[in-house]
Image: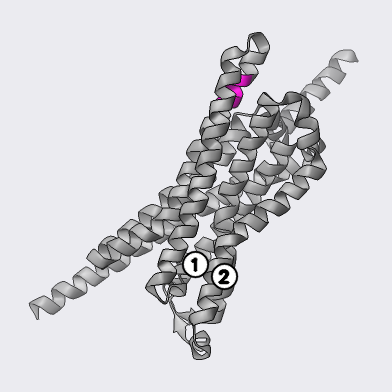
Amino acid sequence: NLSTSNSSLICAFLHQLLTVRVMIVHTLVIIFLCINMLLIVTFVKKECFHTSARYILFFVTLLSDSFLLLMTDILLILTRCSVQVWLCIFICLFVLVYSIVTPVTLTAMTLERYVAICMPLRHGQLCSTRSTMYCILIIHGLSSGPCIVIISMFFATASLSFYNQYTICSVEMFMLYRWQDHARSAVSQFYFMTMGITIVFSYVQIMKVAKAASGESKKSTQKGVRTVILHAFQLFLCLVQLWSPFIETAVLQIDVNLFRDFRYFNYVFFSIVPRCLSPLIYGLRDETFYLSLKNLMPTSSCSKKHQDSLGSVIIR
């Protein structure tokens, strides 16, 4: 009886802890979605952003981050119940693609800064609006690579009856055999290395220009260096997420409760936190975007109307 009561107390505690954690995640997701929506509206309303490559790519990251946060939050809700495999496949398709879209876009944004600082005469040609549209298509094509590999391996090995079964929806569901884990690991490592080398190369080249620059050019270049460093940190957090499943698999072999704690930690710090850095980098650091955001706020419009009315009274 004592052991039964102890186990029921432990179960009740774990259930309460899970509920608190889920509520924390829901709160964070809602806050970041609201911030992202505000920035998206700012971009849409200001026409000057529509012709700038870095702002267009920033808009892409906002959309992909918002969509990914929404889909992962749905997955978090679905962990409490079993769903049919075919429905899980449909949800995970988007999660797999858009979890890669942001790091690939960040790499493209770093390259855009590299072109702007190291090849300023060619920046207008290479980073035109048309070129940026093609770049977005390439970004989504590259981001679909890991998803195509994982889904293809799953379709090749899963039986037809498996699609009608009920299971807890997770990307690990697609890993039916050990070799599929190895294949996913190889693809993730390839993407990790490629994006990491690109960031390091861009940073080194921009630093060379920063040392040789002077005056206003030096200030602009140093700001570009800081932006690249922030992109690198954001990209690092996103890329760590690519390694998380392999660490989680190893932790699962040790203890199930430790696995749950580790997965929660990974989701908050390597999935949610990187998505809040984009608003910080462009929403607050970028002067043009910050002024546009400030003008969009109701308080600023009210104060502007008050100044206009006060001015008209003085003129009279």
Q: In which quarter of the view is residue 4 placed?
A: bottom left
Residue 279, image x, y percentages: 59, 39
Q: Which residue is mark 1?
A: 75
Q: At numbered mark 1, what does the secondary structure look like: helix, strand or loop?
A: helix
Q: Are marks 1 and 2 in contact (CB under 8 Å)?
A: yes
Q: Horizontally, is 250 left or right of 90 in the view?
A: left
Q: Residue at x 55, y 22 (%)?
A: 207
Picture coordinates of residue 77, whole percent (x, y): 47, 68
Residue appearing at x 72%, y 47% in the figure: 135
How many marks can you see? 2
Q: Amino acid at mark 1?
A: Leu
Q: Nearer the viewer, residue 16 or 95?
A: 95
Please report the bounds of the magenta region as a residue range. 221-225
Q: Nearer the viewer, residue 46 or 98?
A: 98
| Residue 242 at x, y percent in the picture | 46, 54
Say which amino acid is labelled 2.
Answer: Ile
> Position of 100 compared to 24: left or right?
right
Q: Which residue is mark 2?
A: 91
Name which of mark 1 and mark 2 comes first in the sequence. 1
Q: Which colour scheme appears in the figure? A: one colour
Please, what is the dominant secondary structure of the magenta stretch? helix
The image quadrant where one finds the C terminus is top right
Give the alpha-carbon distance from disc 1 to disc 2, as whole Å: 8 Å
